[in-house]
Image (cartoon, coloured by chain):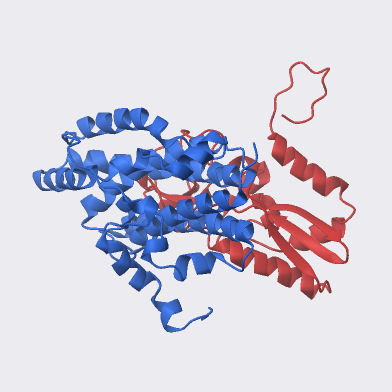
Amino acid sequence: MSIDRNLIKDYAIRLGDDSVVLGHRLSEWCRNGPFLEEDLALTNVALDYIGRARMFYCYAAQLADDGSTEDSYAYLRDCRDYRNLLIYELPRGDFAFTMARQYLADEYNLAFTEALVGSADETLAAIADKAVKEGRYHLRRSLDWMLRLGDGTEESHDRLQRAVDDLWGYTAEFFAMDQLDQQMSDAGIGVDVAGLEAGWRERVSATLMDATLDVPKADWSVTGGREGIHTESLGHMLSDMQFMQRAYPGLKW
Amino acid sequence: MVAADTSASQFIPVIPQQEHERRTRRKVSPDSDLWDLLDVVHDPEIPALSLWDLGVLQNVERRDGTVVVTMTPTYSGCPAVRVMAEDVETALMNAGFESVLVEVRLSPAWTTDWLSAAARDQLKGYGIAPPGETAQEDVLCPLCSSAETRLISEFGSTACKALYKCNSCLEPFDYFKSI
């Protein structure tokens, strides 16, 4: 079955958007980490995500063949053009919030990229192959922090529980299939994200219990990122991330 | 598996298939002068290793008057990749090659399995604990060889390293992560 390369381009862009937005949120910790080693870890993970975004965007630009570049995708599109999942754009919050988001995302992204390795699209499969190896390290670290903070002091436990509660309604979007997801999945190119949900819930619930945390009730959820409907946070983030190219168009290092 | 002597039933694979192919490419290459030239290009962040030792340098060939160099990056966001590409171009241009193209190849993904035994020794000599053969091995202190070490941080000074400390000699050190 042949598939419109424009659709693959859109798919690569949304995966690039996920990576660049989460990567940027992590990079905001640079020199703000709780201690030096953690500062290094947060920024190293940020680098992996930004590197991943570059690969997805470069591939999209190649498919688009309309003069778009990795930079134009990252720096010259407005909020409504971004197709990232909402959970990635939320402000970094305190360290508990950042690590809770990272853990939930790491569990998801590892499963996602493991599935994408089997993509019929060679480039997407190659990017995923790279990401899987990095993802295992990301997860090892964020899982460790869940246990340390959750089963730590009363203060760390309460802050982490609050973070998990505040994030929970955003996790439904991980597994929501829109038309593009469905087309990509049917063509053997993309991932059937709905199929990842059961395993994710099982692993995350086990971790939360180990960390002496409650699994929140699934009584609210928010979606919209894949349609370009975002929280107010993305605009603020982009105004910072895109400042240089907006103020000095075409500026190069 | 390395292309083995099939009569040897006791064959033990020591080099991954892709690494064997990479070494064969160099061995049979008509452009051995180019490969040798690039031996002077080292990892900017781990100067103990050349791009060849590191497994990043995948191929060099002459294509219609252009020298085409193929590299496989270590990590997605490794900032050193750009410097490596520039250093490769500089080395070739200094040797009189005016047209140089550096291509990046992602698949198969780079792995520490591609580090040769010599490269591991070089790392150790440089004070970095080399990656083990499996993911969950003991990390030996590169200074006193003690196995009594502990992890300080999953991430270190570069994307490819983690921070450890030796409980025997008390020195902190970098560990080259196994991926």
Q: Position of residue A195 (x, y in %)?
A: 41, 30
Is A138 displayed left or right of B86 in the figure? left
Picture quadrant of residue B41: bottom right
Rendered colour, chain B: red
Front one among A201 and A140 = A201
Q: Residue furthest left?
A: A154
Which chain is in blue here? A
Image quadrant occupied by the N terminus of chain A: top right
Q: Position of residue A27 (x, y in %)?
A: 37, 62
Q: What residue occupies the far right of the structure in this picture?
A: B30
Name the image quarter holding residue B11: top right
Q: Which one is in front, A24 or B166?
A: A24
Residue A71: image location, x then y, percent: 52, 68
Q: Is residue A111 above or below residue A156?
A: above
Total marks placed: 0
Residue B146 visible from this viewpoint: no
x and y, in percent, of residue A70 in the image: 54, 64
Which residue appears at 51% of the width and 40% of the height?
Answer: A183
Residue B145 located left or right of residue B15: left
Identify the residue at image location x=18%, y=47%. A166
Please report the residue visible at 26 percent of the width from the left and 28 percent of the height from the top: A206
Q: Is residue B173 visible?
A: yes
